[in-house]
Amino acid sequence: MRATAVGQAELKLFWRNKTALFNSLVLPLLLIPLLAIVDADGVPLVIGIIAFVLVMAVYYNLVTTFVARREELVLKRLRVGELADPEILLGTALPSVVIALGQMVVAAVVVGVITGVDLPSRPWFVLLAVAGGIALFALLAAASSAFTRTVEMAQITSLPVLMACFLGSGLMIPLSIAPENVQTVLNLLPLNPVVDLLRAAWQDGPVLRPVIVLAAWVAAGTYAVRRWFRWDPRR
Amino acid sequence: MPHCRTAVAAEIVDGMTAIEVRDLTRRYSGGFEAVRGVSFDVERGEMFALLGTNGAGKTSTVEVVEGLSRPAEGTVRVLGHDPYHERAAVRPRVGVMLQEGGFPPDLTAREATAMWAGTLTSPRPVEEALELVDLAHRASVRVKQLSGGERRRLDLALALLGKPEVLFLDEPTTGLDPESRRNTWELFRALLLEGVTVLLTTHYLEEAQALADRLAIMHRGRIVAQGTVSEVVDAYPSRITFVPPPDVQLPMVADPDGTGRVTVRTNDLQRTLHDLLSWAHAHDVALSGLDARSASLEEAFLAIAEEAA
């Protein structure tokens, strides 16, 4: 696959970027013991870790990556080559996705073993949640990058998605404290269907609605990227 | 055998004109018209140069021909295809060097080239491409540590990596030292001999004069002169300049420039120069600082920029 040539180069750049290396490899290792001593139920913890990685390692990381490559004129250069637009985006996103998957597997297994979590009874919903979540948050990152002029600005432009995901998904504050009609609206936020599908993998729960919401978000994200993604810096 | 006939027809169309631009207009989102009705053809195996002052619309034109954006009006064909809508058909056969190429600063020259090679259908070996632009000895140096001229040459290596039939070069020698520029010119000549078609933009008029088969001069989004170097230049007069002694009646019209030096413009340099020198000899007049030159591209260019201003 031609996009992997770009992915390999991105992976080299990742290894040479000390900050990125620390944030995605060392920091999680330091956090795992902290998570393990928390007296919490294993399943919500594992779900929380997967969701957190999706938002930070996939979404936030990719907003900065897309902006950096655009401002370095790397995307513009790639666009005069043979790769099609989706291949360029895929290649650029590949290392972040691979690293995020690694983080999820390692953290979920370690925490799962320590807290004695059973294997999910419906594991395909984990696969669906992770695959759909990665696609969605990579698309949202590409869309957000269009409204982000510099790498530093990403801290601000990513806030709406970060807030919506962390506050509205029930991971930090239980959704049950909100009135029912508010809950219904919150369940339309992007991270909620992912969390719902993960819960459904361990406990019984609704799957049709989250699948539809997730698919709608992926479709909306694809539209937003096609409509607004910027390949070269503003003049 | 309708199939065969189509193939032959395509071959013929393909064989003559590499780039065809018709009434091209490009408008930016603010409404600014950077290119206003530009037309030109580039034949197979020739180098066509686009010249012009800053902001004349050269890069805006070339970006549309490369297929980076779509024309507001008019049509573009590269090797018989629409470069924007038929990107997949055109790109494997062309090489592009943008005015400002982008490479991740932390990759080495070799890694950047290898990455590019991985995206191509039939790339040259990486070392060969670096060799072509005389960068093999800098292959392990990171892009951010390369000089401006070295980065230009790396960009050229990438443009050549796919063995292109058509090459787009947007100010390829800007920032190169004189020796690198000469070496790069030699490389362009070798590519032209191999039959590669080149669309060049440049600020260096001597570059166009030395290399281009034909050229167009753009001003404010329009082509104001087009043809071979001599066709463009011949429309402009030759010049003779000198400082005559004070209070001498010259035998021909001469424009003073205020410092005592005068300029004679002529379409027949040999005859006018002969007349002037015969007169000076007969009247024993000294013409100090005498300088006679045929019209050059530079003079044509400056005259066009002046006229249009």
Image: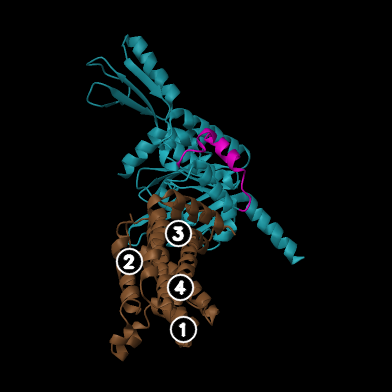
Location of mark 4 (residue): A133
Regarding residue A230, the answer to whether it shows in the image is no
Q: Quadrant of residue A224?
A: bottom left
In this rendering, the count of numbered labels is 4
Badge 3: chain ID? B
Tell me: B254 left or right of A101: left
Chain shaded cyan: B
Badge 2: chain ID? A
- Residue A103: percent from left, percent from top: 46, 64
**Are the residues flagged by discs 4 and 2 in contact, CB closer than 8 Å?**
no
Of the numbered discs 4 and 1, the one sitting upstream in the chain is 4
Q: Is label 4 or label 1 in front?
A: 4
Residue A158's tag is: 2
Q: CA distance from mark 4 to mark 2?
A: 17 Å
Location of mark 3 (residue): B69
Of the numbered discs 4 and 2, the one sitting upstream in the chain is 4
- Residue B32: percent from left, percent from top: 33, 58
In the rendered image of this protein, does residue A85 appear above or below residue B125? below
Q: CA distance from mark 3 to mark 4?
A: 32 Å
